[in-house]
Image: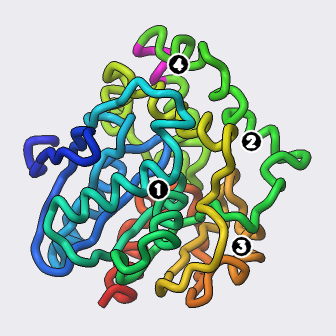
Amino acid sequence: MADVWNHQYAEVNGVKLHYVRQGEGTPVVLIHGWPGFWFEWNQNIGPLSEKFDVVAPDMRGFAYSEKPDLPPEEGYTESVIAADIAALIAELGFDKVHIVAHDFGATWAQRLARTQPELIDKLVLFNPPYPGIGMRWFEMPQPFESWYMLFHQQPWAEDLVGSSRATTETYLRHFLRHWSHDTDVFPDDEIAEFVEAYSQPGALRGGFNCYRAIFRGGGAGGDGMIDVPTLILWGDSDPILKFEWSDNLGQSFSNYELKKVEGAGHFMHRELPERVNKEIVDFLA
């Protein structure tokens, strides 16, 4: 499958980032979350590239990009990764881009929208972590879903999960399927792509470091109002980012539209790609 994709690399902020690029026109950058990488957009890149210049990077620490061995609070904060996105935009010669993001990607995109809004034309976020969620992550019974955030703080977490390809697969498969409304949305051959990506040296540590950085200095996209025009799609079946948590979006976004997506979990771009691709095209056009 991989041979149909246009793989490229760019040096940004001293880190070599891998990305897939396809199409032409107005640039659209697709930002993955955890446990993700560029391939989670495999149902979106092709259709979106019919109208846009689509770029899907692996951010630092993930998959096929470089993974600096830095303390989380230095090398993996939202500000650092948002700066990488800004540098990638500049490196590719874009003045302004649309950004589509979810999970961690949505927090990095929010940080960029607050610090360098001139780089973003429009923003599309799926089930985004944002400041208005507050401490609901850790109010009972939610810790039965949020436990992995605390597990990722442990210095031995990546050694345990990465002790074999089988343990890596068990861990990733749990989240990919449990967080989806349709538990079969990720077939075995695609889960194998995730296992390969997270079996790259340092890839588990890189992802876990993003969680460590949040616990060592705050996160969820930063403070202040985002004025960039924003479409927020929120699945009604996401166990880790519940739809009812969308109640405080007005505290963070001055110009947003919220759409509830029925029958979608955490990975709506994989679960309902035709619906999501249409929403993206209609909003960005």
Which mark identifies residue 105? 1
Between the C-alphas of marks 4 and 1, the distance is: 21 Å
Which amino acid is tagged 2? Glu
Which amino acid is tagged 1? Gly
The earlier-in-sequence mark between 2 and 3 is 2
Which mark identifies residue 270? none
Secondary structure under badge 4?
helix
Which mark identifies residue 158? 4
Q: Position of residue 125 (x, y in %)?
A: 50, 70
Which marked residue is nearer to the observer: mark 2 or mark 3?
Answer: 3
Q: Nearer the viewer, residue 99 or 243?
A: 99
The earlier-in-sequence mark between 4 and 1 is 1
Q: Position of residue 4 (x, y in %)?
A: 9, 49
Give the residue displayed 71% in from the left and 64% down from the top. Answer: 131
Between the C-alphas of marks 2 and 3, the distance is: 18 Å
Secondary structure under badge 1?
helix
Secondary structure under badge 2?
helix
Between the C-alphas of marks 1 and 2, the distance is: 20 Å
Residue 134 lies within the magenta run = no
Residue 167 lies within the magenta run = yes
Which marked residue is nearer to the observer: mark 1 or mark 2?
Answer: 1
| Residue 249 position by quadrant | bottom right
Q: Which residue is mark 2?
A: 145
Q: Nearer the viewer, residue 266 or 128?
A: 128
Going by the image, does 270 lie left or right of 86?
A: right
Q: Which residues are magenta?
A: 165-169
Which amino acid is tagged 3? Ser
Going by the image, does 214 lie left or right of 107?
A: right
